[in-house]
Amino acid sequence: MPDLITLEAKIKELEAQVDTLRASAPDDKLSMVVMSGDLDKLLAAFIIASGGSAMFEQVSMFFTFWAIPALRDPKKNPPAKNFISAMFGKMLPKGSTSLKLSKMHMGGMGTWMIKNLMKEKNVLSLEELIKKAADAGVKIYICEMSMELMGFKKEEMIDYPELKLAGVAKFLSDAGSSKSTLFI
Amino acid sequence: MSNNLNDLKATKTVDARSMACPGSLLEAKKAIITVNVGEVLEILSSDQGSREDLPAWCKKTGNEYLGHLKRDGYDSIFVLRKK
């Protein structure tokens, strides 16, 4: 007969260990860094994000550098900018519809062809995927530092329900508690 | 589980045939909560990737993948809601 007091102590000890394990277990989250401004890579990012919304409780995308112009709204006019920022704005894509393929862009021909093929094969366009992600509650964070560096303003970004500015700490804390982390 | 999927009666059927990846997943997620626990959801998909995707989705979400039936140009995929 094991004595009850020893058993009780054992159970207490095990309970404490379970609590510690629970606290350090990752949450049911997917976090990704989206750095590329290529159409194909953004398609991949949003397919994974919207598909991920069916698999994970929370999906977050952190947009940095070349990916930020993909979130610009071509219908919005940014507030006054200095010369260099205005130049950046001119040279970088104005929103998801003006992105290029990373390969076979061929002066626009390749990108045009792939968009037509996607329609034919019932693949959602990037704009539709962004809408799906929004409906599914996918969170988008824009890296404030690179946005400022490129001279973009939050006011010229798309209307997206869960769009916020953040820094590296927000990403690292999300990534640290996520089951999956991707860099695209 | 019944090994004859033909005898299976789905409580609800959703049509994801006009959708490429990740359409069937998103439809499955939306529809599974419309059937009760213990009931079967049927997903029609013309995307062959669904044969791998839906079992993976079931495993992750704690539902049971019952299998698929090949139809004319698409699959009927059966999922049992477990929770």
Image (tube, rainbow, N blue to C red):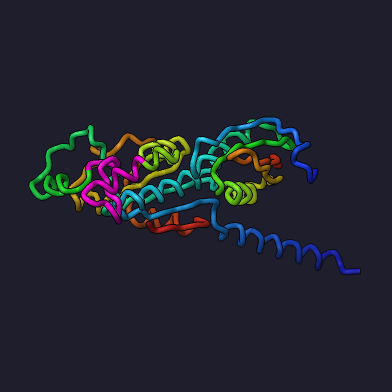
Out of B78 and A90, give the one closest to the viewer.
Answer: B78
Please state, as top left, top right, bottom left or bottom right, where the N terminus of chain B lies in the image.
top right
Residue projecting furthest to the right: A1
Residue A143 appears anywhere in the view: no
Residue B44 appears anywhere in the view: yes
Query: Residue at position x 41%, y 46% from top?
Result: A46
Image x and y of residue A178, in percent: 50, 55
- Residue A180's place in the image compared with A77, above or below, is below
User: Where on the picture, by quarter, is residue B16?
Assistant: top right
Out of A16 and A71, give the one closest to the viewer.
Answer: A71
Q: How many marks?
A: 0
- Asked if residue A30 lies left or right of residue B43, the reply is left
Image x and y of residue A159, in percent: 32, 34
**Main structural element of the magenta stretch: helix, strand or loop?**
helix
Q: Is residue A54 magenta?
A: no
Image x and y of residue B9, in percent: 75, 33
Query: Residue at position x 36%, y 52% from top?
Result: A41
Query: Residue at position x 75%, y 41% from top?
Result: B5
Q: Which residues are magenta?
A: A94-116
Out of B82 and B45, give the one closest to the viewer.
Answer: B45
Please state, as top left, top right, bottom left or bottom right, where the C terminus of chain B lies in the image.
top right
- Residue A95's place in the image compared with A176, above or below, is above
- Asked if residue A92 lies left or right of residue A129, the reply is left
Residue projecting furthest to the left: A83
Q: Is residue A102 magenta?
A: yes
User: Where on the picture, by quarter, is residue B38?
Assistant: top right
Query: Residue at position x 44%, y 41% from top?
Result: A121
